[in-house]
Image (tube, grey):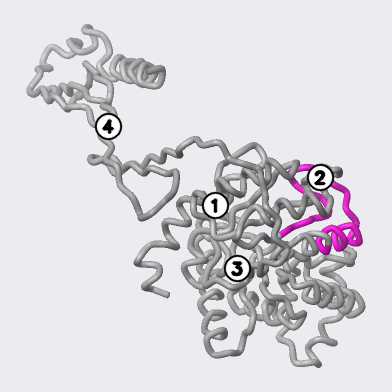
């Protein structure tokens, strides 16, 4: 009601400015009103009366508030605890979630088969950023009821007393869907000063607790600030071993070129695999790159033997998004030909790139189930991405 009142006041103000006073309308003695047109309100715009005068002067008055949307209930299929509505007139969509009490009771079955995070054709992954196990469980189960395929849990954002084997087990076993754990050194959400050793240990602990996979940052065990320079300095070494190093000119961040560090990272990856977990290597390049550079960088990282490569790029223009899509299509062709044997997730720091790349072969769509003060709207809404990935058009295209 307040919004309608505000719109009405604004419209009346516009009318006064447009029509002016009676004196302004009659200022020209030759001005005569030649037509009156009444426009009815819709659910998108206010109604009004438009007056046209002989000298071309036009003004509007008698504004009426726009109507309420005329919603029709519809569904994409069997969606639990969710009702969708669409306006018959303008197509505006509205979602209503059934508010239900979410249990935090968890039955831990250590004999169950560990779910695979890399085992799907595409992954609509809900971000879970909570301070304690109970809230993480509620968030996971709520996102699962909204269609999430899997979950990315920021275990480094949890309070110190919550980062235990017992608490992690409750999180990993609260769902049958795969959970990827992530532990960055300096979290954007809740400040945590983790060393590389801290990150490695907490990630291993999560796999012992049943996590399907871990996110290993490309800077693990490395000197973050020196990485682009070291990579460039060692470029000839890698070129002599047959690598296409065209991506080095872009000076991407989080790409390790130090052979000793890479060997240490490889041992960590082997440890995770030995524990039954999968590894996603994440690189937040922080630069724009061409499709050929993106492909070359993925090929370089692939030899670390990860199960998934996540490459996050800069740039939100249409041209940069096109480069992301071209890279996705080419990497998918290499996969189908057996020349690229791990999953890849390529996208830019833009909504358009995050939305479209999964449609062109990128494996993971990182989503937000409910926006909060720590879950940013750069990520795609979960229900939007799930609807796209479950649509007959998308599945038919695959």
Write down the region rendered in magenta: 181-204
Q: Is residue 391 visible?
A: yes
Q: State how far apart marks 3 and 4 are (Cα).
A: 39 Å
- Please tell me how crowded label 1 is: few (under 14), some (14-19), or many (20+) other residues with Cα within 10 Å: many
Q: Mark 2 packing: few (<14 Cα in 10 Å), some, or many (20+)?
A: some
Mark-to-mark CA distance, 3 and 2: 32 Å
Q: Which of marks 4 and 2 is in front?
A: 2
Residue 369 vs 332, above or below: the answer is above
Q: Earlier in the sequence, mark 3 or mark 4?
A: 4
Disc 4 to disc 2, C-alpha distance: 49 Å
Q: Nearer the viewer, residue 340 or 270?
A: 270
Residue located beneath label 4 in the image? 43
Q: Do the residues labelled 1 and 3 touch (CB within 8 Å)?
A: no
- Mark 1: which secondary structure? helix
Query: Image height check: is 160 above or below 340?
Result: above
Which disc is residue 162 wearing? Answer: 2
Report the mark closest to the observer, 1 or 4.
1
Q: Is mark 3 on a helix, strand or loop?
A: strand
Which tag, 4 or 2, sits closer to the chain's start? 4
Q: What element carries label 2?
A: helix
Tell which residue pokes out farthest to the left in this image. 34
In depth, the one of 229 and 341 nearer the eye is: 341
Number of the label disc, if any, that sits on residue 346? 3
Classed neighbour count for the residue bearing mark 3: other residues with Cα under 10 Å, few (<14), some (14–19), many (≥20) = many
Q: In this view, does 91 lie to the left or right of 364?
A: left
Residue found at x 13% / y 11%:
29
Q: Position of residue 227 (x, y in %)?
A: 85, 68
């Amino acid at each position: 009601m307040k919004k309608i009142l505000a719109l009405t006041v604004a419209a009346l103000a516009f009318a006064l400015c447009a029509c002016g006073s009676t004196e302004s309308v009659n200022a020209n003695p030759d001005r005569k009103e030649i037509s009156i047109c009444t426009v009815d309100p819709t659910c998108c715009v206010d109604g009004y009366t438009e007056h046209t005068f002989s000298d071309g002067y036009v003004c509007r008055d008698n504004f009426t508030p726009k109507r309420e949307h005329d919603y029709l209930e519809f569904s994409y299929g069997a969606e639990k605890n969710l009702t969708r509505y669409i306006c018959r007139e303008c197509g505006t969509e509205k979602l209503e979630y059934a508010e239900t009490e979410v249990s935090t009771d968890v039955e831990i079955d250590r004999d169950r088969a560990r779910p695979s995070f890399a085992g799907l054709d595409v992954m609509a992954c809900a971000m879970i950023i909570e301070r304690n196990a109970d809230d993480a469980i509620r968030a996971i189960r709520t996102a699962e009821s909204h269609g999430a395929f899997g979950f990315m849990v920021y275990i480094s954002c949890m309070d110190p007393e919550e980062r235990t084997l017992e608490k992690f087990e409750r999180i990993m076993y609260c769902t049958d869907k795969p959970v990827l754990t992530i532990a960055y050194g300096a979290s954007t959400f809740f400040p945590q000063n983790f060393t590389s050793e801290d990150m490695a240990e907490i990630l291993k602990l999560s796999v012992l607790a049943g996590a399907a996979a871990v996110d290993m940052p490309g800077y693990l065990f490395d000197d973050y600030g020196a990485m682009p320079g070291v990579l460039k300095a060692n470029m000839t070494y890698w070129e002599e071993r047959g690598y296409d190093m065209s991506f080095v000119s872009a000076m991407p961040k989080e790409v390790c070129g130090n052979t000793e560090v890479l060997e240490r990272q490889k041992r960590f990856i082997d440890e995770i695999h030995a524990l039954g977990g999968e590894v996603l290597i994440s690189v937040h390049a922080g630069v724009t790159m061409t499709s050929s550079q993106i492909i070359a960088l993925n090929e370089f990282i692939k030899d670390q033997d990860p199960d998934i490569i996540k490459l996050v790029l800069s740039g939100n223009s249409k041209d940069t998004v096109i480069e992301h899509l071209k890279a996705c299509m080419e990497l998918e062709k290499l996969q189908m030909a057996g020349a690229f044997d791990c999953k890849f997730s390529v996208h830019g720091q833009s909504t358009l790139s995050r939305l479209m790349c999964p449609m062109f072969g990128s494996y993971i769509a990182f989503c937000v189930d409910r926006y909060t003060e720590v879950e940013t709207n750069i990520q795609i809404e979960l229900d939007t991405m799930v609807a796209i990935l479950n649509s007959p058009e998308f599945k038919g295209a695959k």
